[in-house]
Image: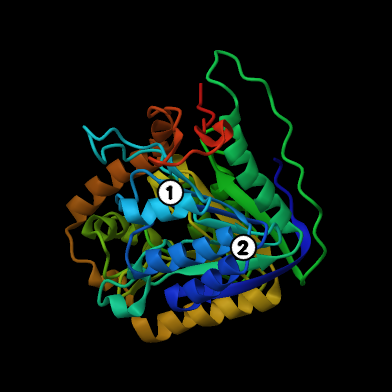
């Protein structure tokens, strides 16, 4: 599938589980033809049970339901949970399941996308997993995150992408593979004013598409760049674009974790603070709860929401998906939301806050420069196995869905 901007879309911002889950579960339960889901995490908590009920409603109404969960990100599901779905006709798949003997050991090249496609006409894209930790009543560890609901012609591209991901498993495991024609999906009518492009990262022909689109948008910025990202440790080229934008007068603001779910994340990002602050970039730490967002905006039109962090895993290893929009209304809505975070829930990081000796700073900067300049290429050389999409025990889907082979780099 080629990447191209498509006009005529309606994009609606959904913040956190409070907005995302009720809307999504309502749409799934109302499906009559098809539900496709890819997610990194599905837990059997109240959110997982809400999804379970919606999937059962859709399947019993005649919709074909395929749900794929990552074998590392998701915890084991109970037999009761899975067998009731399978009995209703739902097809459940695990991406790259780990052998029971070794458990959750493979950290690399995970299915990190969060995609939902309903009846071929409505899509949800974002960073929110199916877990109660995305709800405020989860407590201090509740995560701040975003997704979008999309209607319009770009949904057909998302639909085709998800069908192709399933169809890749139809070929038998032979030493040759016959190239398959892309799935045929109907052209959808215009639904709004947004130009949109669906962008993904894989380990084949689209290894750096998300990063390239980010860097292009930053390069074209004239007034402002705002990035809210949970795991921030991009390569040197990305950092250079941020500094260059700030040097030409663009207001560049980063919203990063101040109360991280994993302390090493904040430590890694903080190693870049001097370099960014010296280049004129503004840094804000979100301190209310863990930040899980993967969103950004440029000037008054461009914006993105998706699953991709700006770290080595997302930029060089994991399977990710973002949607990018050119739309003043959506941009203004996201900008108001992020400015609200900055004004009320963030602490601005200033150069004088960073206490460390000049000698340590110079030595660290030397090693960081060479690491950031080379790590994307190094990460790309890590083993690129062929992840499998296996049916959960007890499921009997068609052979076409039993294994998904990802194109591996040479």
Residues at discs 1 and 2 in contact (Cβ within 8 Å): no
| Residue 69 tag number | 1
Along the viewing direction, whichever of 212 and 42 lies nearer the viewer: 42
Give how far across and how far down residue 173 sits, in percent.
52, 19
Q: Is residue 184 above or below residue 38?
A: above
Q: Nearer the N terminus, badge 1 or badge 2? A: 2
SS category of the residue bearing label 1: strand
From the viewer's perspective, is residue 142 above or below residue 108? below
Residue sitting at x 43%, y 66%: 293
**Image-quadrant location for residue 316:** top left
Observer able to see residue 64 = yes
What is the C-alpha distance between the residues marked 1 and 2?
Answer: 23 Å
Relative placement, left or right, of 326 versus 383 is: right
Q: From the viewer's perspective, tell me whether residue 71 is left or right of residue 163.
A: left
Pick the front one: 49 or 22: 49
Q: Is residue 182 left or right of residue 94?
A: right
Q: Can residue 288 be seen?
A: no
Q: Quadrant of residue 133?
A: bottom left
Q: How far across and down, in percent of the image, does residue 319 sit?
A: 48, 44
Residue appearing at x 50%, y 33% in the figure: 402
Q: Which residue is mark 2?
A: 61
For marks 1 and 2, give the one nearer the viewer: 2
């Amino acid at each position: 599938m080629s990447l191209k901007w498509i006009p005529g879309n309606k994009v609606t911002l959904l913040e956190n589980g409070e907005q995302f889950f009720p809307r999504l579960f309502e749409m799934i339960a109302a499906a009559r033809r098809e539900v496709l889901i890819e997610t990194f995490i599905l837990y059997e908590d109240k959110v997982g049970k809400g999804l379970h009920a919606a999937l059962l409603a859709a399947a019993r109404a005649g919709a074909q339901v395929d749900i794929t969960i990552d074998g590392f990100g998701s915890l084991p599901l109970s037999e009761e949970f899975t067998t009731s779905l399978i009995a209703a006709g739902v097809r459940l798949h695990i991406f790259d399941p780990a052998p029971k003997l070794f458990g959750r050991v493979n950290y690399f090249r995970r299915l990190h996308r969060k995609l939902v496609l309903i009846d071929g006409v409505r899509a949800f894209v974002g960073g929110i997993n199916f877990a109660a930790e995305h709800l405020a009543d989860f407590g201090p560890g509740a995560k701040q995150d975003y997704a979008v609901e999309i209607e319009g012609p770009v949904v057909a591209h998302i639909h085709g992408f998800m069908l192709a991901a399933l169809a890749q498993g139809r070929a038998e495991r032979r030493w040759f593979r016959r190239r398959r024609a892309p799935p045929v999906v109907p052209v959808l009518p215009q639904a709004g004013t947004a130009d949109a492009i669906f962008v993904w990262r894989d380990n084949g022909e689209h290894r750096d598409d998300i990063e390239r689109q980010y860097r292009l948008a930053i390069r074209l910025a004239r007034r402002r760049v705002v990035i809210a990202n949970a795991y921030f440790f991009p390569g040197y080229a990305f950092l250079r674009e941020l500094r260059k934008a700030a040097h030409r007068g663009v207001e560049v603001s980063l919203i990063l974790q101040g109360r991280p779910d994993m302390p090493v994340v904040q430590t890694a990002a903080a190693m870049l603070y001097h370099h960014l602050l010296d280049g004129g970039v503004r840094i804000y730490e979100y301190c209310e709860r863990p930040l899980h967002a993967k969103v950004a905006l440029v000037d008054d039109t461009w914006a993105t929401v998706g699953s991709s962090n700006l770290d080595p895993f997302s930029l060089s290893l994991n399977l990710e998906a973002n949607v990018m929009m050119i739309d003043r209304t959506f941009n203004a809505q996201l900008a108001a939301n992020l400015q609200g975070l900055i004004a009320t829930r963030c602490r601005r990081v200033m150069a004088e806050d960073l206490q460390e000796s000049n000698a340590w700073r110079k030595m660290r900067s030397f090693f960081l420069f060479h690491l950031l300049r080379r790590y994307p290429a190094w990460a790309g050389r890590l083993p690129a196995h062929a992840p499998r999409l296996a049916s959960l025990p007890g499921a009997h889907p068609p052979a076409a869905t039993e294994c998904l082979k990802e194109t591996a780099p040479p």
